[in-house]
Amino acid sequence: MKFSHILVFCLIAIAAISCVEVKQKPVFQSNEAKVLVQNSDAEKAIANAAVENFHRLFNEKKNQEIFELIDVKSQLRQDKVYMVLWMEKLHRALGKFESASLTNEAVFKKDKTFEVRFEFI
C-alpha cells in the first residue's frame, strides 16, 4: 500500500499544480532555488482544494478529466490512452478513496511559483 500512497501523492501534486491559475506561464527549471515559506495558509488551501478535486474525480472514475489536469510539460501527458488505462488499472487495484491523514506539509517559494508538498497515510 505504500507504493499506492506515493502514487496518489504524485498525482495529487500534478493536480494541485494544474488547478492554479497563473497570468504568466512560469518557466520550470529543475535546479530552481526553493525557500521554505512560513504562514502559507493561502497556498495550502489551493493545494488542498486540488487534492479534494482529484479524489472526487478518482472516485467518479473521471480519468480523462484527470488527464486534462496534468501539466502539458509532464511526461504523464505524452500518451492519453496509456494514462487513462493506467488510471483504470489503479482504480481497480485500490478501489475508491475513502480517507487519509495528513502527516507532513510544506510550502516552498520558487522564482515564479509555489511548490506545496503534502504527505498522507
Image: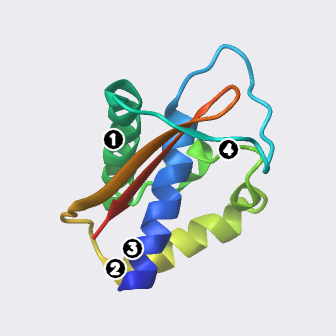
Please state which of the two labelled residues, at mark 1 or mark 4, is closer to the viewer: 1
* Displayed quadrant of residue 44: top left
Give how far apart the Cα atoms at labels 2 and 1 are: 21 Å
Q: Residues within 10 Å of mark 1 (few under 14, many from 20)?
A: some
Going from the N terminus, do you reach mark 2 or mark 3 first? 3
Kindly identify which numbered label has been placed on residue 94.
Answer: 2
* Foreground residue among 4 and 64: 4
Q: Are marks 1 and 3 in contact (CB under 8 Å)?
A: no
Please state which of the two labelled residues, at mark 2 or mark 3, is closer to the viewer: 3
* Foreground residue among 98 and 32: 32
Q: Image point 62% across, 48% down: which residue?
A: 70
Q: Is residue 3 left or right of residue 30?
A: left
Give how far apart the Cα atoms at labels 1 and 4 are: 18 Å
Q: Image point 39% across, 83% down: which residue?
A: 2
In what quadrant of the picture does the N terminus appear? bottom left
Kindly identify which numbered label has been placed on residue 48.
Answer: 1
Going from the N terminus, do you reach mark 1 or mark 4 first? 1
In what quadrant of the picture does the C terminus appear? bottom left
Q: Could you tell me the amino acid type at mark 1? A: Asn
Q: Image point 75% across, 42% down: which residue?
A: 32
Going from the N terminus, do you reach mark 1 or mark 3 first? 3
Residue under numbered circle 3? 5
* Helix, strand or loop at mark 4: loop
Q: Position of residue 88 (x, y in %)?
A: 48, 73
Going from the N terminus, do you reach mark 2 or mark 1 first? 1
Please state which of the two labelled residues, at mark 4 or mark 3, is closer to the viewer: 3
Q: Could you tell me the amino acid type at mark 4? A: Asp
Kindly identify which numbered label has been placed on residue 71.
Answer: 4
Give how far apart the Cα atoms at labels 1 and 3 are: 16 Å
- Position of residue 30 relative to residue 83, above or below, is above
